[in-house]
Image: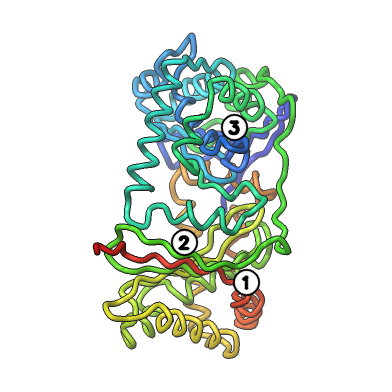
Amino acid sequence: MVDYERLILGNGLRVILHRDELTPLVAVNLLFQAGSKFDPPQKSGLAHLFEHLMFAGTPRVPDFDEPIQMAGAENNAFTNSDYADYYSYGPYQNLETLLWLEADRLANLQVTSKAFKTQQKVVIEELHESCLNEPYGDIWHHLLPAIYKNHPYRWPTIGLTAEEIGSIKLKDIKGFYRQYYNAENCILSIAGNLNINETKKLVEKYFSQLPISPASAKNFDFNLREYRPRKIHIQSDVPVPAFYLVFPMVGRTHPDYYVLDLLSDLLALGRSSLFYKKLIKESEVLAAADAYITGTHDTGLFMVEGKLSQGVTYENAIDQILEIIEQVKHELVEDRIMEKLKNGLESSVVFSETSTLSKAMNLAYYELIGDVELINSESEKYQMITATDLQRVTNTYLDQKLMTVLYYEPRSNE
């Protein structure tokens, strides 16, 4: 059980506090509803680029990392489709320093033209190194635009093209900062060996005067009626042929999210999974297989991917995958397998809450999706899943008529 206190400052900042006397550390986490789905059209990658620039410094703290290190702390950040997250952790005695630094850059970030151009080049290079020049690394650059025609999930977080990232101007960055990096659009969570009352005073001291947003973050909807399944063929410098089967599914807060998560484990988690036993060990049509869900907020994707064994055709491998899916649609999973799957997921949930930093991050995330108490109750949602639920969601969501297929073929050297 993770105990916490929740409060809202006068400027709208949501604050979650958790005390853990058993650790010498404290973790500070700031989550902003400022993911890549809020990128302006034709300027994809802006949210991720801005994450880099949050470390650019302020008039009082020109080098953000230096005082962090002097405090014996560490920090980092990440951006995804839905939000951006910034965290630091270190000795609990230096909590005030961590809060002061975060509040300072939230109020006084100073991005020079030089810093902007430098980080813009860094991000473009990152796009090439981790995506465009990496085998299978540009998969989302092909899949997302094909699936999300009118939703901003249609571009990857890093950006769709180098040209779009390069088109971002410093004024775009400053506008994004004003609109999304403010008290109303932020969740501050603090976990560790802290005094709750003293921490409330520090939060009030450093964060109560932060500006309020000129406009709140808007919501987006995914209309399945606008979705049309496609077959996509790509030739690239990859070692073996691969394929991806993609099915639209519900967003992160829908009850079926948990059932689909369990279904992905049934299909592909470990050596006891259906894919491993039937496709890798028995028929040997695949050298590797996986199934997973994206977990994005407005809608999600159920992904199945495989890499072909030598001499195997796409048709043969995909037919065998679809046969396994049909089996799940028509046969109830045995009780012992259900218990093993649920216990595995419960262990993952519990393990994710063992560290001080993880608890701070999870508290902020659950607050974002609407129910901070999920930090204590989410494992129960997995335990309540039945074999009938698995059968139902497989029939509902893994419909071949909704399946987009991407074929990834090695480039011909002829």
Q: What residue is at 52 percent from the left and 44 percent from the top?
A: 80
The tag on residue 273 is none
The answer to whether residue 204 is left or right of residue 56 is: right
Secondary element at image label 3: helix
Tell me the crowding category of disc 1: few under 14, some 14 to 19, or many 20 or more residues within 10 angstroms, Cα based: some
- The residues tagged by marks 3 and 2 sit, at their Cα atoms, a distance apart of 28 Å
Q: Which residue is mark 1?
A: 402
* Residue 348's disc number: 2
Of callouts 3 and 2, the N-terminal one: 3
Q: Position of residue 330 (x, y in %)?
A: 60, 89
Residue 93, position as x, y percentages in the image: 44, 25
Which mark lies nearer to you, 1 or 3?
1
Instruction: Look at the image and tell me whether residue 130 can be seen.
Output: yes
Amino acid residing under circle 3? Ile
Give the quadrant of the C terminus.
Answer: bottom left
Q: Residue furthest left?
A: 413
Which quadrant holds residue 376? bottom right
- For disc 2, the neighbor class at 10 Å (few under 14, some 14 to 19, many from 20) is few
Local SS, label 2: helix
Q: Amino acid at mark 2?
A: Ser
Above or below, 110 relative to 328: above
Q: Residue furthest bottom?
A: 331
Dot 2 or dot 1: first in sequence order is 2
Q: 10 Å neighbourhood of mark 3: few (<14), some, or many (≥20)?
A: some
Marked residue nearer the N-terminal end (1 or 3): 3
Question: Residue at left 58%, top 69%?
Answer: 260
Q: Name the image quarter holding residue 230.
A: bottom right
Q: Quadrant of the N terminus?
A: bottom right
